[in-house]
Image (cartoon, rainbow, N blue to C red):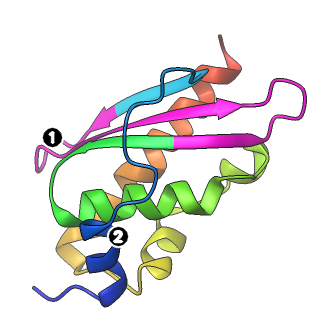
Amino acid sequence: MEYTETVIEHFTNPRNCGKMDDANAIATEGSPACGDQVSFFLKINDDTKIIEKISFLSYGCASNIATASVTTELVTGKHIDEAKKLDWKTVTEKLGGLPKVKEHCSMLAVETLQAAIKNYETR
């Protein structure tokens, strides 16, 4: 299985990794198919609805870590309405592609992000 240099870079040097104590939006989702899990912690400005900070924790493979890492980069500074439009194909493309058997990691990252935003909106 070959990974792009971008996937390897995000796996070995993940961005925004770690728990955020002042998050006001949190979600954890898992994949029963492979056992991967990801949690996102967002700090959303209540007035502007801009994602000011986002971090993640991951339990899983290199693709899981890389997709969570790149997802944080793609939505930092974005309005939650824009972040809700992020799709798994965009995440995969930003990484320069993933092996077909690992594309579910991009889906998991996006689903977890959307769950965190939904949790924020319904709190």
Choose top left, top right, bottom left or bottom right for residue 13: bottom left
**Looking at the rendering, in which quadrant would you find the N terminus?**
bottom left
State whether residue 61 is above or below residue 5: above
Q: What x and y, as percent, mark residue 109?
A: 40, 51
Q: Amino acid at mark 2?
A: His
Q: Amino acid at mark 1?
A: Pro
If you read the primary sequence from the N terminus, does the residue marked by circle 1 or circle 2 appear first?
A: 2
Disc 2 target residue: 10
Q: How far is disc 1 from disc 2 in space, using C-alphas?
A: 24 Å
- Circle 1 residues within 10 Å: few <14, some 14–19, many ≥20: few
- Circle 2 residues within 10 Å: few <14, some 14–19, many ≥20: some
Disc 1 target residue: 32
Looking at the image, which residue sits at the far top? 123
Residue 60 shown left or right of residue 78 in the figure: left
- Name the residue located 35 percent from the left edge and 50 percent from the top edge: 108
Of 24 and 107, nearer the camera is: 24
- Please provide the residue range marked out in magenta: 29-54
Q: Is residue 24 magenta?
A: no
Of 6 and 64, nearer the camera is: 6
Residue 8 shown left or right of residue 85 in the figure: left
Q: What x and y, as percent, mark residue 44?
A: 71, 32
State whether residue 77 is above or below residue 9: above
